[in-house]
Image: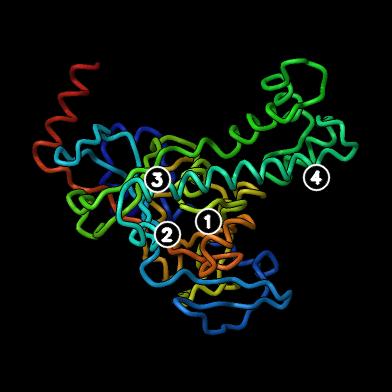
């Protein structure tokens, strides 16, 4: 068992957490991306696949972090010890001066997402009836990364088809997309996260997810924290040391379109434990591949049509004496 897993509190340990070393490395190279050749790109690196697909590496300093969060009084988040925290450092945040301008980035992202949902609906509406039949919905589900099985489609009609006529209207399809991708929350930013972890410096966007949440929900947090609209998110793991983030040296762990690819990652906490075992450039390190929408590419051309972003993990932070006392008191008073 890893040092991190041994350090988990007793209440967390009872959840049958799968430790990182129990998640096997998959070495079937046929399942990996095609070999690539590097090219120089301003602000980062670019790889061109044999299919002429460009895979960019985010400029230095752009990265996600993910770790179990233990509440720090000075930050005032009131999250106790039940959540993981994700942070994002991105040049878009520093390129504007005011909070209102940073919020505007996410308003543009919402508009781009609305347009993408509309485009998917129109592609799936083959007969131009302004509604989706079950077969058409299956086509649309493939585009948004949801299962397209008969049972799943039936459940979606039950939850979202008000007319119960097996024809999903545009506003009903929007609810299906929200079920898959989650809502885009108002962004949160801080320059004080170093109080929880000294590595978290500068202006960072941040979000929380419950430790016991399914690991694939972490993709939602990535999607919603990134300031540009995305159509696909993949969390990858290095099979070898990989300081240049070459895709053919990685395996997919969780994919928007293909779901979870390995066993043992049952919760967000499992993924945080796995990420904390090694840096993103080492064997076993994690990287996020993000694929923006068409408008998203225009808003941040430096990232290209597919971008590799480091996904760095940390052990649970030390909340300090007062933080531990507050969490203990909260548990005591709430039973």
**Quarter assignment of residue 139:** top right
Horizontal placement of 301 versus 205: left or right?
right
What residue did someone put label 1 on? 235
Between marks 3 and 2 in the image, the one whose residue lies nearer the viewer: 3
Whichever of callouts 2 and 1 sits on the residue coming sooner in the sequence is: 1
Residue at image coords 61%, 65%: 305
In the rendering, which numbered label is found on residue 123? Answer: 4
Q: Are marks 2 and 4 in contact (CB under 8 Å)?
A: no
Which percent across, then down, holds residue 321? 9, 39
Front-most of residues 288 and 239: 288
What residue did someone put label 3 on? 103
In the rendering, which numbered label is found on residue 311? Answer: 2
Horizontal placement of 285 versus 54: left or right?
left
In 3D space, how far apart are the residues under numbered discs 1 and 4 (Cα atoms)? Answer: 28 Å
On screen, residue 262 above or below 243: above
Q: Secondary structure at mark 2?
A: strand
Q: Are marks 2 and 1 in contact (CB under 8 Å)?
A: yes
Which percent across, then down, holds residue 232? 61, 53
Which percent across, then down, holds residue 69? 28, 43
Scheme by which the image is coloured: rainbow
């Amino acid at each position: 068992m890893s040092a991190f897993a041994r350090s988990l509190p007793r209440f967390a340990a009872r959840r049958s957490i799968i430790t990182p070393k129990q998640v096997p490395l998959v070495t079937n190279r046929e399942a990996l991306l095609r070999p690539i050749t590097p090219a120089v790109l301003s602000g980062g690196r670019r790889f061109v696949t044999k299919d002429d697909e460009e895979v960019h590496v985010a400029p230095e300093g752009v990265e996600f972090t993910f770790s179990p969060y233990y509440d720090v009084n000075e930050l005032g988040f009131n999250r106790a010890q039940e959540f993981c925290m994700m942070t994002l450092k991105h040049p878009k945040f520093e390129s504007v001066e005011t909070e209102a301008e940073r919020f505007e980035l996410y308003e543009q992202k919402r508009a781009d997402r609305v347009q993408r949902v509309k485009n998917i609906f129109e592609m799936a509406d083959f007969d131009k009836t302004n509604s989706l039949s079950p077969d058409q919905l299956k086509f649309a589900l493939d585009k948004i990364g949801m299962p397209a099985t008969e049972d799943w489609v039936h459940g979606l009609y039950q939850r979202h088809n008000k007319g119960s006529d097996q024809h999903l209207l545009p506003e009903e399809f929007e609810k299906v997309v929200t079920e898959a991708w989650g809502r885009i929350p108002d962004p949160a930013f801080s320059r004080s996260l170093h109080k929880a972890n000294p590595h978290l410096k500068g202006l960072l966007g941040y979000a929380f997810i419950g430790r016991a949440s399914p690991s694939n929900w972490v993709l939602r947090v990535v999607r919603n924290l990134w300031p540009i609209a995305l159509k696909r998110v993949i969390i990858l793991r290095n099979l070898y040391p990989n300081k240049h983030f070459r895709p053919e040296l990685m395996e997919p762990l969780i994919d928007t379109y293909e779901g979870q690819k390995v066993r043992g990652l049952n919760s967000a906490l499992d993924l945080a434990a796995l990420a904390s075992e090694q840096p993103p450039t080492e064997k076993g390190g994690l990287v996020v591949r993000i694929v923006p929408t068409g408008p998203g590419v225009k808003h941040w051309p430096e990232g290209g049509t597919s971008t590799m972003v480091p996904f760095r993990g940390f052990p649970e932070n030390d909340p300090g004496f007062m933080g531990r006392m507050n969490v203990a008191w909260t548990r005591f008073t709430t039973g």
